Image: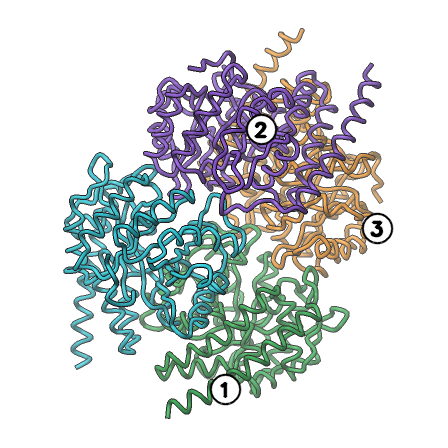
Chain colours: A green, B orange, C purple, D cyan
Amino acid sequence: SMAPRKKLQGLVAATVTPMTPDGQINLSVIRQYVDYLVSKQNVKNIFVNGTTGEGLALSIQERKQLAEEWVRQGKDKLDHVIIHVGALSLPGSQELARHAAAIGASGIAVIAPFFFKPTSKDELLAFLREVASEAPAVPFYYYHIPPLTGVKIRVEELLDGIKEQIPTFQGVKFSDTDLLDLAQCINKNGGEEFVFLYGVDEQLLSALAIGANGAVGSTYNYLGQKTNMMLQAFAQHDLALARKYQFLTGEFLNFVIKLGFGVAQTKAVMTFVSGIPMGPPRLPLVKASEEFIAKAKAKLDMLQFTDCFSMWHVEVNGT
Amino acid sequence: SMAPRKKLQGLVAATVTPMTPDGQINLSVIRQYVDYLVSKQNVKNIFVNGTTGEGLALSIQERKQLAEEWVRQGKDKLDHVIIHVGALSLPGSQELARHAAAIGASGIAVIAPFFFKPTSKDELLAFLREVASEAPAVPFYYYHIPPLTGVKIRVEELLDGIKEQIPTFQGVKFSDTDLLDLAQCINKNGGEEFVFLYGVDEQLLSALAIGANGAVGSTYNYLGQKTNMMLQAFAQHDLALARKYQFLTGEFLNFVIKLGFGVAQTKAVMTFVSGIPMGPPRLPLVKASEEFIAKAKAKLDMLQFTDCFSMWHVEVNGT
Amino acid sequence: SMAPRKKLQGLVAATVTPMTPDGQINLSVIRQYVDYLVSKQNVKNIFVNGTTGEGLALSIQERKQLAEEWVRQGKDKLDHVIIHVGALSLPGSQELARHAAAIGASGIAVIAPFFFKPTSKDELLAFLREVASEAPAVPFYYYHIPPLTGVKIRVEELLDGIKEQIPTFQGVKFSDTDLLDLAQCINKNGGEEFVFLYGVDEQLLSALAIGANGAVGSTYNYLGQKTNMMLQAFAQHDLALARKYQFLTGEFLNFVIKLGFGVAQTKAVMTFVSGIPMGPPRLPLVKASEEFIAKAKAKLDMLQFTDCFSMWHVEVNGT
Amino acid sequence: SMAPRKKLQGLVAATVTPMTPDGQINLSVIRQYVDYLVSKQNVKNIFVNGTTGEGLALSIQERKQLAEEWVRQGKDKLDHVIIHVGALSLPGSQELARHAAAIGASGIAVIAPFFFKPTSKDELLAFLREVASEAPAVPFYYYHIPPLTGVKIRVEELLDGIKEQIPTFQGVKFSDTDLLDLAQCINKNGGEEFVFLYGVDEQLLSALAIGANGAVGSTYNYLGQKTNMMLQAFAQHDLALARKYQFLTGEFLNFVIKLGFGVAQTKAVMTFVSGIPMGPPRLPLVKASEEFIAKAKAKLDMLQFTDCFSMWHVEVNGT
């Protein structure tokens, strides 16, 4: 099994699921994808079959195949391969948890069920516990994303006594803008037992300011290197420089959000940035338009240039 | 196969999924359940594995087993057995559609996918079409329930040209309070090609007033007979009497909604009304409290009594 | 004072506020407006300074001037002139209530305050009571419109004991699609003490079916006559004919809603239908586009034609 | 007139409106309030008649009286007295703007109208412009608070060309958790023409991290001194210490929010912290319960103690 060499921190790319032109999962490019992340983006952790990975739009069988291939190709190259095993159906989620354990995943993550929604901390915890207990030796992460699930149970409440219910609990992918909740989590977690990975890429710096340990997101697939430089600047107390990098991601996202930006568009961006064919999304998502691709590419190119320039500018001034 | 003897209309019970005390599906009571619906409620159509049936919280395998048993037990007793085959995953939904066709279901229904949500009529239609085409000889119903899915694409728009895309399209389970949309559907459907079954039980009379053909809902499991009497009064142009029955359902639902009412509570009510053990719901739902059960039972008993009294009253006056 | 000759029922037009081209209130056409409503639409009740009347966008002084002019011009022509006196500020609302009493309004109505929102029945009732008590001889109506206010306190709860708190309480303008709540109100109101006027024009027939006493809405400004025919058909138990009229309103609203339909557009429609210049709306509303006006006019003309035809058809068949 | 001696920055207290026990505005304690803010909280800027000040629940006359008294008492003691003049009614808002100019306010602020909501940047801008132009020599601030108004027009879009429309435009009170929008505003504002004051107190540090210039909020009435120490720590690049202060505010707010926290409760807290009787809120708000007050007081006392301890701890370690 893939015993983590170090605690999960820094950047985690929420991987897209490569598909063939006719909409089947495409395992054949995953090796190349791993190498790209490591060599081009300096990103060594991945979050597989999550929102970006269209996990909930895949069959159980497809999710298993993908998990296996990512773990296989990540071996000796990646630090952490977290498999998202959340599902609306508890038995489905449990089956995926057992599978993730069997293939040696570094961790599993579970989204709150969102058709029937838990209405209290206890109901949510009961569901998570029943999944986590199927993989009793695998680090467990709760995937908190209320804008998509509508489940607004505060994480800081969920943490109370969570270790008794879920001994493998390790942390949270926190994808929300309620930074009071995140701050309370971090404050409670004085002993640094758990990790809090922020999931709203365009405001990561704000989460770092209050103590987030890292980030999980889709933009780290193609802006990982830049964001790593932001993390570095932040670690060196150079907030002005960190801000420049944050504004870069922000400007790109702000631009594409206005054009309509989701998983389909992320797959298109990743295709032109990495050169790896990520294919179309699965219905009800439909593939990005040529117009979107052209505009997004132009914007990204412009930002890279700007970025180089301002880097030079900063260095000159900084000397 | 179960060729419908007549067009789907009137009441359709959205069945709960019986479970054993330890949370496994309990096929053994389905025969009894069918007999109860026919003999005690005079309800001869069912909607299986829908919201009330916890369909989305079941595994694909469980859904198939349930569909099979309902079709088997419904043979020669029920008029229509509609199997809900909607799922977040297109391949999962397609697999269920093929299965429903193979076992001879009277119809299939599909909810709009709601994690990634279709943002236009075309995206929704594309998803539905890919499912429907897997069961090319089975009547297809769209299950419209925006309060749960967040997919607010208007049905009257969806109808435009739907037969070209989905030749098996037959109608809609319309579970929303936007009666303008429903009215437009009915208005467009002048030739009465399609059926519109209303899904908000507490305001069914309002939907009948604008021409709904029938209803699908959970209360028809235990208030089916009463609602049938409402349909009869309505058919006889006795709106005052129909209103009395509608107020009955309304008073019960109004009461239990304040206590917290969902599928878990419906299972409890059905257990005490029918005497058939429906068991607990599946997580994240948790079983109804004893307090709820006591209060709901008392309320229902009181309403039945009132109802008998006013029936007598009406008959006396009506003579 | 204008003592109502009969109980408020049937149609109530929610009047627009005529303005001059430069955005001042235009009292000079109100006389003509009253005559138009009575002679062309057969509508003899009005709801002044409500949502359609842009009441909350007017100054207290303007609201008083308008109330006075409507009451003056309505004398001996109209049955009921209801003045909406709701405001975010309690003193403002009280001032308007006193004024309405002084000028002899037939009734006052108050919307729930919606910046700071009441969170319980008691908080809402306390606010309403403090306004109503300033006009102790004037019938009081609660204006329930949760889609605009976000105040979802159920009316049926509000009714419990309301007469003790607000002796002048007379009824509700119910502008919501929660027909369970409305049905409960009507059910409780067995003695017919109160009136329930429905405020979602496109589904009035559905509210009539469960016992609504009438309607308040903007479309009765220009589709009043048609809706009166719907009321008549309904009263004569001819639901099929009533439905035709409901579909008429529905088809128009469905069409214009897609173009963008609000108070600004209602003013434009009323201008071309009545020939009375209603003027622009007040900021932040902006006047309807020429394109909207052309399309809305064409649609309305077409519907009138269709309608005449089917009327003829009905009469021929009905004879 | 009160010409600002320096650019608005740092903390701005959103003042509560003192009221007498019977609910009238209480001007008599405003002098004491000003002295308290300056001497005990080191806060020298105020935002009057905003949300915390119940501005929209006051009559125009009351708002003028309050504005006058705050400006009078703030003279020579405060740096900036910003008067919120927003209203649903454009003429009302304009009247308040003229008045604020006449009495020498340091600035005016306007909330987006929220009954009829502007649906585009242009509609919002047109409304703001018509108010601002009534006070052509007074700095103008837009008060952005989408959680209360529902107006989600992005500020970064609003900024484009705003100086041409509103020459007095000076900045934004940004009360939202969409930090991408705030970051874009700050990024665009490279030349530092405008100020961005953050309005979600519990996550101010996150806004500072991306370049916010200061803050407007209710907690600065009683946690101003502590928050000033956070600003100081942040300015000295001591993020760890700044975080401690942020957690302090967060822990208090997190605690009281669970008890139910709004303007009524803020008035109660301010009364026991400052010793100045702030009185009850106005309906539909109702005064805080004794139980709330006891719990909030205990929590705040505990935090102060903790805080003192950790300050000592920090100093010892820091030496």
Q: Residues at marks 2 and 3, common chain? A: yes
Task: Give amino acid for label 1.
Answer: Phe
Q: Do the residues labelled 2 and 3 touch (CB within 8 Å)?
A: no
Q: Of circles 2 and 3, which is in front?
A: 3
Residue marked by disc 2? B249
Left or right of B59 in this view: D126: left
Looking at the rendering, which quadrant does residue B114 occupy?
A: bottom right
Q: Do the residues under discs 2 and 1 have CB atoms within 8 angstroms? A: no
Q: Which residue is drawn at 57% across and 25% down?
A: C32
Kindly state the secondary structure of the residue where label 2 is placed. helix
Give the spatial CA distance, label 3 vs label 1: 55 Å
Crowd band around label 2 with a 10 angstrom C-alpha radius: few (<14), some (14–19), many (20+): many
Which disc is residue A309 wearing?
1
Tag 3 near tag 1, CB within 8 Å: no
Residue A160: x and y, percent?
36, 60
Q: Where is residue D113 in the image (x, y as percent from the top left)?
A: 44, 47
A172 or B278: which is nearer to us?
A172
> Which is more toward the observer, C171 or A71?
C171
On screen, C175 above or below B142? Answer: above
